[in-house]
Amino acid sequence: MCDIAKFEEIIGYTFKDKQLIRQALSHSSYANEKKHPNGSNERLEFLGDSVLSIVVSDYLYKHLTSVAEGDLTKLRASLVCEKSLHIFAKQIDLGDFLLLGKGEENTGGRERPSILADAFEAVIAAIYLDGGMEAARKHILRFIPDDLEHDAKKAFSDFKTVLQEVVQKNPEEKVEYVLIGEEGPDHNKRFVVEVMLNSQVIGKGKGRSKKEAEQLAAKEALELMGYEAQ
């Protein structure tokens, strides 16, 4: 039997309906072994995945106002992927509280990334069903890194800065960004920018904004120059 009270203490949430959190912690192997197939966490995992996505999307949209849509999508994917959820699950010792069948128990199920990630989503759903969206949001946001905005801006918006630093090693060199065209209707316009080094084109980028296009042009230039533009 898992210690529900101890787990509640770790996550900072007390369930009104204890059966919800018990189900969230019940792997299918345990439910099948106990002849309770509807008691596993699989359906809760399905719901938790959606709750997690909307909370993370809402947070990124409101807090990373200068990050383009494509990069927001990449960032969200990095936060809700199995690798990240496995890390989050370990932060709350989730594996210690899982209800597993004997087979999973004996083959290291408590440490298996897929099982922990699925259970993490199931716990989110249990909190959502028991306490509503705000309770679920509070739980999820505790795992969002404090320096996410800084990291995102550094990851997605520093290509121009890096290129400038590379070029400045030769004081006589000059970088210039030139808008060479616009494509698409007003509601879905794409801007095309070339970055030039001493009047020679060294990169081209296309984006939803001039700023994004410039960053992508700088990224291409860095790659052509042999620099890793992550």
Image (tube, helix red, strand yellow):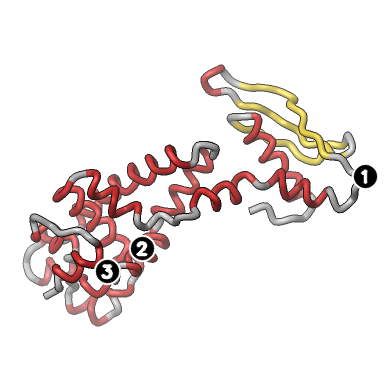
Residue under label 2? 88
Q: Name the residue under label 1.
A: 172
User: Residue drawn 73% across and 26% down?
Assistant: 179
Q: Residue at point 44% right, 50% down?
A: 77
Q: Tell me if 66 is positioned left or right of 31 in this view.
A: right
Sooner in the amino-acid sequence: mark 1 or mark 3: 3
| Residue at mark 3 | 94
- The type of residue carrying mark 3 is Leu
Where disc 1 sits, the SS reads loop
SS at circle 2: helix
Q: Residues within 10 Å of mark 2 (few under 14, many from 20)?
A: many
Which residue is pictured at 55% across the width and 53% down the height?
151
Instruction: Name which quarter of the figure residue 145 lies in.
Output: bottom left
Q: Residue 194 occupies which quadrant of the picture? A: top right
Q: Quadrant of the N terminus?
A: bottom left
The residues tagged by marks 1 and 3 sit, at their Cα atoms, a distance apart of 58 Å
175 in relation to 170, above or below:
above
**Mark 2 or mark 1, earlier in chain:** 2
Name the amino acid, label 2. Answer: Phe
Question: Quick check: 116 left or right of 194?
Answer: left
**Looking at numbered disc 1 in the image, what kind of residue is underneath it?**
Glu
